[in-house]
Amino acid sequence: MKVAITAQEADTQSKIDRHFGRCAFFYILDEITGKSEFMENPGKSSPGCRAEIIVGKLVKANIKKIISGDFGTNVQQLLNKYRIQMILQPDEDIRIDRIAEILTTHQLNMPNLDHTGPEGKGPRTGRGLGRCGKPSDQIPPAPHFELGKGMAARRQSGGGSGQGHRFRAGNKKK
């Protein structure tokens, strides 16, 4: 899978760029083969955001994930349209080589990149609603909630049906 990372310079020692549309370069990394290259942002010097041009070039390069400090609303809509995953990296001091190391060693299993889980209790300790540890062919389409089923019914643990008022049309509480 190919990943694009916004970069300030065409160097792996460069820091991540905060702005997707105004970044100078994209660091393109193939997670499987480990091959990488820098691609110049075609819309960096254009007046206004040229989201169509930038996203179009990334789609042609077969990018499936983009890591950046921030994404504009137009860019978000286009990336959602092409089903490209957006990953926000709030740490502006992280370098491109560190992100590449995390990606190639497959350490991106948890949102905080530290395998602590949602409450610091370790991996796979959440409610099972996230995408951690699931192969991409087993990820249900979002939203994956079913009407009328509580958490326990989705887990098949015997509960979670609630009081059922929503489904009893003629029975009203007085």
Image: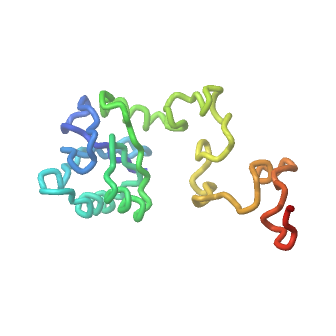
The quarter holding residue 120 reads: top right
Q: Residue furthest bottom?
A: 170
Relative image position of residue 111 (x, y in whole percent) = 51, 37
The image quadrant where one finds the C terminus is bottom right
The quarter holding residue 52 reads: bottom left
Relative image position of residue 8 (x, y in whole percent) = 21, 38
Q: So how many labels did they put on this image?
A: 0
Task: Tell me: 45 left or right of 114.
Answer: left
Relative image position of residue 163 (x, y in whole percent) = 84, 56
Residue nearest the viewer, comparing 126 with 13: 126
Relative image position of residue 140 (x, y in whole percent) = 62, 58
Q: Residue furthest front?
A: 174
Residue nearest the viewer, comparing 150 with 98: 150
Vertical comparison of 122 with 80: above or below: above
Residue at 12 percent across and 52 percent down: it is: 45
Residue nearest the viewer, comparing 104 with 173: 173
Task: Tell me: 8 left or right of 59.
Answer: left
Residue at 26 percent across and 44 percent down: it is: 19
Vertical comparison of 174 with 100: above or below: below
Residue at 18 percent across and 49 percent down: it is: 40
Residue at 66 percent across and 37 percent down: it is: 126
Residue nearest the viewer, comparing 29 with 82: 82
Vertical comparison of 91 with 70: above or below: above
- Figure coloring: rainbow
Vertical comparison of 60 with 114: above or below: below
